[in-house]
Amino acid sequence: MRAFEYTSPKQKQQAVGLLGQQWNDAEVLAGGSDLLALMKDDIVHPKRLVNVKDVQELRGLSFTPSRGLRIGSLMTLFEISEDAQVKEHYPILAQAAGDAASPQIRNVATIGGNMCQRPRCWWFRNGFGLLAMGPNGKSLVVAGDNRHHAVLGNEGPAYFVSPSSVAPALIAYNARIRLFGPKGPREIPLEKFFVIPKSENEREHDLRPNEIVTDLIVPAQPSGAKASHYEVRQKAAFDWPYATASVVLDMNGGTVRSARVVMSHVAPIPWVSNEAAQAVAGKTISEQTADAAGAAALANAKSLGRNKHKIQLARVAVKRALLQAAKGGQA
Ligand SMILES: Cc1cc2nc3c(=O)[nH]c(=O)nc-3n(C[C@H](O)[C@H](O)[C@H](O)COP(=O)(O)OP(=O)(O)OC[C@H]3O[C@@H](n4cnc5c(N)ncnc54)[C@H](O)[C@@H]3O)c2cc1C
Ligand code: SF4
């Protein structure tokens, strides 16, 4: 690991002041479960680390029935998964946070870090850059072993998959993310925080090098909303899933008034499927409608050569999440 300066500010204004204008001037350190591995592997090499764990205002979790949930960016996945209010009002957030990684990792991994974690693409993690371009300017992913890569939003040049399995649950609940930078606070829909980079010097988040994530805001859900989160994993162990689907249904009796269907690990961003939502709107959820929604969600998917199986896995995840939600969802 290269030498770096370590700072531990107590205020968010100080933290932002210690960050740089360019990536690699400085990096924010939260739980360190991703960043330290990236530094040890020399994938990122900041001159300065800005530890934000002493910034108290980034902590805390509160819920009010009218305003919904506020989660400070330093809350750990463990704390979120065990919180009684989260379990009651946002069950698939509790589930997704509790299913990620292992107990040891969930104990240190923060929700802010989870949103900002970097892709697991094996070329990126081995120093070939986020877009994994070969010396001839051609994608190594397209020519190589792309079994874990994107099947949607994969027109290029980005082919990695967005690694968070928690973000889709938050996006299904229409969460917003709050950022803080030199010009003050900024709040955007979480869905818009994830972007597909077009060049090697862009990142996969709408986050400037001198901004930090301060909170996540999850609005109150309509009464009677039904939610479900379905993960396809190689086995029940601590690794990232192959594909997930998070579903929130706003119900009018037995009929779906509107739906949010969000997949992870299928695209360079958490993938919101308006096609699947439209396929179930105004309908009751049956084996047939759920299957049609799964098909609609993946209708535009394209295999890169070795990842065709992911199309089927994601399709089944959407179908099963919808069926589970209609039965009452996750408790
Ligand atoms: C074995 C293993 C299995 C895993 N499985 C899953 C899984 O199934 N699903 C899943 O979603 N995740 C999984 N993870 C990822 C894990 O959840 C993340 O590593 C963790 O959430 C990152 O949080 P952190 O606080 O440790 O972040 P750090 O490692 O401290 O930071 C990660 C990145 O976010 C940036 N960052 C952190 N906090 C902020 C902030 N407040 N503002 C701006 N930037 C910030 C850092 O600069 C860095 O780039 C797994 C990790 C491991 C090691
Ligand atoms: S065994 Fe568990 S605690 Fe040890 S390094 Fe692996 S994930 Fe971390």
Image: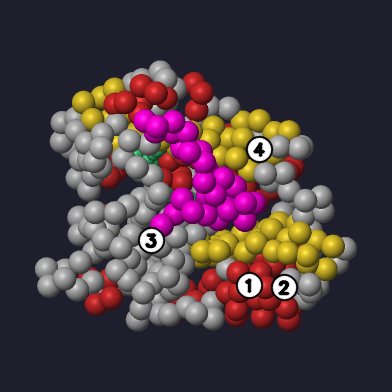
Who is closer to the viewer here, 121 or 18?
A: 18
| Residue range corresponding to the magenta coloring | 167-196
Give the alpha-carbon distance from disc 3 to disc 2, as whole Å.
28 Å
- Label 1, on which residue? 276
Q: Is residue 290 visible?
A: no
Residue type of the residue flagged with mark 3: Ile
Q: Which residue lies furthest to the top in this view?
A: 10
Q: Is residue 292 visible?
A: yes
Q: Position of residue 66 (x, y in %)?
A: 76, 37
Q: Where is residue 289 in the image (x, y as percent from the top left)?
A: 73, 78
Q: Position of residue 88 (x, y in %)?
A: 74, 42
Q: Which residue lies furthest to the front in this view?
A: 183
- Label 2, on which residue? 280
Decide: marks 3, 2 in contact (CB < 8 A)? no
Say which element carries label 2: helix
Residue type of the residue flagged with mark 1: Ala
- Label 4, on which residue? 69
Give the alpha-carbon distance from disc 1 to disc 2, as whole Å.
7 Å
At label 2, counting other C-alpha atoms closer than 10 Å, the crowd grade (few under 14, some 14-19, many 20 or more) is many
Looking at the image, is mark 4 or mark 3 earlier in the sequence? 4
Q: Which residue is found at the position 31% from the left and 26% from the top?
A: 17
32 over 148 or under it: above or below: above
- Label 3, on which residue? 196
120 over 7 or under it: above or below: below
